[in-house]
Image (cartoon, grey):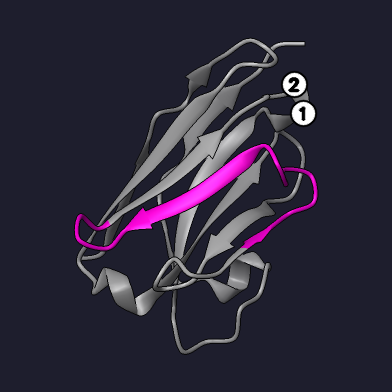
Amino acid sequence: QVQLVESGGGLVQAGGSLRLSCAVSGLTFSSYRMAWFRQAPGKEREFVVAINWSGGRTDYADSVKGRFTISRDNAKNMLYLQMNSLKPEDTAVYYCAAAPRYTAPSPTPRSYTYWGQGTQVTVPS
């Protein structure tokens, strides 16, 4: 059974930092491209950042470039998202997602096969 479990969300003041984690089990982690998406109330789920199977390539949404950093530890089956300089517009539920490495990279949610349950990040204005 595949499981993706996010943690690390919370309430943080604007300008602060959070580190999200995603623990993955039930699949061969190094065979999957991983990504973070987020969804704010009343909005569609949006792409945040993706990382290839080895960690050698990353793709960031323009809105988070220079502030967020994705990383992975294939030995521990863990995905991370370091979020710095947080803004109120970063408020959302953050989801980790997995897609087979042989599939073409895409920022669309439907290109990802497995999803976590999400973790809430709140940055008050």
- Give amino acid for label 2: Pro
Secondary-structure class at tag 2 = helix
Q: Is residue 115 above or below residue 32?
A: above
- Reading the image, the residue beneath label 2 is 88
* Residue 4 spot, x, y in % from top left: 33, 53
* Residue 19 spot, x, y in % from top left: 45, 31
At label 1, counting other C-alpha atoms closer than 10 Å, the crowd grade (few under 14, some 14-19, many 20 or more) is few
* Residue 84 spot, x, y in % from top left: 61, 28
Q: Is residue 20 above or below residue 117?
A: above
* Membership of 120 in magenta stretch: no
Apparent side of residue 1 relative to residue 68 in the rendered image (left or right): left
* Residue 2 spot, x, y in % from top left: 25, 64
Residue in the image at 52% along x and 87% along y: 103
Secondary-structure class at tag 1 = helix
Among the 4 quarters of the image, the one containing residue 59: bottom right
- Reading the image, the residue beneath label 1 is 89
Among the 4 quarters of the image, the one containing residue 109: bottom right
Quadrant where the N terminus sits is bottom left
Question: Which residues are the magenta region?
Answer: 59-77
Nearest the viewer among 122 and 29 is: 29
